[in-house]
Every structure is written in structure tokens, then in C-alpha cells.
Image (cartoon, rainbow, N blue to C red):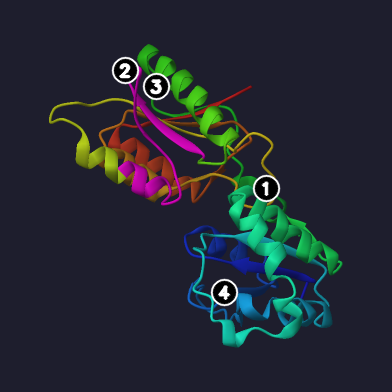
Amino acid sequence: MTGTALIAGTGALPALLAAARPDMLVCELEGFPAAIPGREPLRFRVERLVPFLNTLVSQGIREVCFAGAIQRPKIEATKFDFRTLALVPRIMTAIQSGDDATLRAVIALFEEKGLTVVGADSIAPDLVAGAGVLNGSVSDQDRKDAARARQIVEAIGAVDVGQGAVVARGLCLAVEALPGTDAMLRFVAETRKPGHTGGVLFKAPKPGQDLRIDMPAIGPETVARAAEARLSCIAWAAGGALLLDRGATLAAASAAGIALWGIGA
């Protein structure tokens, strides 16, 4: 074991990281299985967070990487140990302040145990999506729509709402909120008028966001949902997003006629 633990949620990213570092200890929150083939995870509950942290330290873990989606679990008051229970007021204050505050509070709890929290880009740097057009061609309208979407994402990110927006011909069709990118794209697909095509999905971190947790990600499923929404381009802030399963993502984008574009600063 390398002394690194992967706190794995759902989605494609945890399996990619586990493949990159097969000697990592895989951990998962009960009720949110990562389902990584061939890996039996160490399971934990929020109500027993302190014992879980102590277990990591006792097993020689020195750094932790969070990856994948985790929804807020159902809390069972009877399952708390007294040490974790003492943290509840602190955690609840963070939750009420928004997702970013919650993530910062989680990072702080791990760091107070002497654990270093690292980002997915530290485990698999090749996943970071850089600048440039990776597939297809970007039209002038795509560039205008991307610029508008970027403004919107910066605005909603500043108030801790989401990391993405869809814009077509200057009009905002949807913004990302708690349900996530796939839900936003399904909404666009279901509400667009027949025959309307084009538009850009733009994703970027929230201003000041700690990229060690919840860096935006784009993968084959994103392309599939964007195709259903009849978009022409997926764009991201270069260096601020992960490109999952690059080969499959590029192939899906090529088949769907969707441009992939990393926008520099």
C-alpha cells in the first residue's frame, strides 16, 4: 500500500484513479458504491467519521484523494459515536453555507488528523483537460455562446450554485445546480423546441474553488447527454476540468459531431 486512500463516490472517475494507482486503499461511503472491479472497499458512515479517520491513520495512510459523486446521505442519530457527534454543529454550519464551505470543512477534518488531501490531478495528471480544440471545429456562434456561458458560470459559481451552463444563440437554456450536469442536459433535451440545434455546454470551477475536491469532469456520458440536447460544442476552462476516458470521449464527440474545446485564460 502506498499510504494513499481513495474516497470513492459514483461515476467513472474513481475506477480510472484506482487503475492508475492499483495499490491505493479504496474507501466508500455506505450507500454510495463505487463498484470498482476487483477492489473490496473499506466502507464507512458519516456518523462514525472520527473512527474512520483513526482507521486510516492506523493503517499508515498519509494522503487522501476524493473522487466521484456522493449525495448527502441519510443520517441516523443512533449510529453516532460521541467523538463524531461533537463535530455535528461544525459540519451543519458548513452545510448551511453551501457546497464549497462543506467541502472545505471536510478537507479540514482530514487535515487535522495529519492527512494530506490531494486532487485527482495529482493521482492521474493526464486526465486534466488543457487548452485547444480536441475535436471538430468551433464556429463563430460557438465562440460567442461559450463567452456568454462563461460569464454565467462565473456568476453562479460566485454564489456557490454550479459549475456549468448551456447557451445557444446568446440565450441561456439552463444552469447547473445541485442535481448536476446530466440533469441540466436532460432538461435542455426535454425543453428545446423541435428543430432547434446548436449551443455550447461550458464547465469551469467556481471562483476560488479548492480543486482538490469536485473538479469539473467531462466524459463519454457528458457527450451523450449533450448530443441528446442537440448541442454543437462542449467547452471548459483549460486546466480546470478533467477529461475522463479521453479516447472514448473523443470518439463519442466525433460520432455526434460535437466540438470539444479547452478555453485558455
Mark 1 element type: helix
- Proximity of marks 1 and 2: CB atoms separated by less than 8 Å: no
> Quarter-wise, where is residue 49 in the image?
bottom right
Q: Nearer the viewer, residue 185 or 98?
A: 98
Q: Earlier in the sequence, mark 4 or mark 2?
A: 4
Q: Which residue is mark 1?
A: 125
Tags 4 and 1 touching, CB below 8 Å: no
Residue 132, placed above or below residue 91: above
Q: Quadrant of the N terminus?
A: bottom right
User: Residue at label 3?
Assistant: 137
Q: Secondary structure at mark 4?
A: strand
Query: Quick one: label 1 or label 3, which is nearer the N terminus?
Result: 1
- Disc 2 residue type (three-letter): Arg
Q: Residues within 10 Å of mark 4 (few under 14, many from 20)?
A: some
Q: What residue would you read off at disc 2?
A: 169
Residue 220 in the image: above or below residue 114:
above
Measure the alpha-carbon separation of dots 1 and 3.
26 Å
Callout 3 amino acid: Ser
Q: Quadrant of the C terminus?
A: top right
In the image, which is nearer the foreground, mark 2 or mark 3?
2
Query: Can residue 217 be spotted in the picture?
Result: yes
The reply to whether callout 2 and callout 3 are in contact (CB within 8 Å) is no
Mark 1, other Cα within 10 Å: few <14 / some 14–19 / many ≥20? few
